[in-house]
Amino acid sequence: MREVPEEAAIAVTYNGATHAVMMATPTELEDFAVGFSLTERIISDVGQIRSVEIAAFPLGVEARLWVDEECAGRLSARRRAMAGPTGCGLCGVESLDEALPEPAVVGADDVRFRPEQIMEAIDALSAGQPLFRETHAVHAAGFWTPDDGLVAAREDLGRHNAMDKLVGALKRNGVDQTKGIATITSRVSVEIVQKAAVLGVPVLVAVSAPTMLAIRTAEAAGLTLVGVARRDGFEAFTRTERITF
């Protein structure tokens, strides 16, 4: 029998109130909840989360977060209910400003990588994809450094969810994201760039191509965006000075 991935409704709640319902792979959900909270700018630091609880039910899972009152106040100001299909990054937003906020600005201007390191980073991601090897039906996001190789990788049916899980994993573990490369097994839409900018990683490498909006957003964020990274090379779209040819 063919192995297939699980898919479940994940309700993200803050201080007892449901904020979003996403379809996702029900693994590493604490990482997902923390990463989602950061990339949605509900919190700006993991220290603003008082506790996280994952509760499973017959119809799905609740990721219950208790956050500081200041964060709860921001939630009340931009309340939204969202029922998103797998991997959807903008379902339920209520305005253009909410859909396309000013991106976070990436620092790490002194970081440089050689082309062979770019290729090594994307190649290393395969080691962190056990669910893909079983099912061939999920995306992955990873983080690689020259000193440590593949530091972390997270998988999910949705590429946005995989990136949120990666953000949560790195932030929860206090990893210095300014010295490495984020990788993803998908095309690059604007939401992926926005999430990478919130993470603060200087370089994002994808196996497929970016959209024009993703390129413009990466440029505004100061993020080096690399796409179409395959065995025969890659294409650099923004901030190419971080790549030492």
Image (cartoon, rainbow, N blue to C red):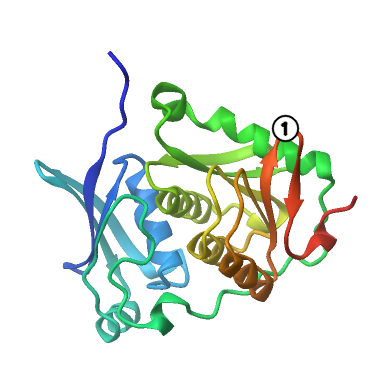
Q: How many numbered discs?
A: 1
- x and y percentages locating residue 106 in the rendered image: 66, 69
What residue sits 73% from the left and 60% below the top? Answer: 237
Nearer to me, 134 or 76: 134
Is residue 68 placed above or below 244 in the rendered structure? below
Where does label 1 land, which residue? Answer: 231
Residue 71 occupies which quadrant of the picture? bottom left
Is residue 20 placed above or below 57 in the rendered structure? below
Residue 83 visible in rendering: yes
- x and y percentages locating residue 109 in the rendered image: 79, 67
What residue sits 71% from the left and 69% below the top? Answer: 107
Residue type marked 1: Arg
Residue 214 occupies which quadrant of the picture? bottom right
Is residue 178 placed above or below 124 in the rendered structure? below
Residue 146 visible in rendering: no
Instruction: For the N terminus, give its image quadrant.
Output: top left
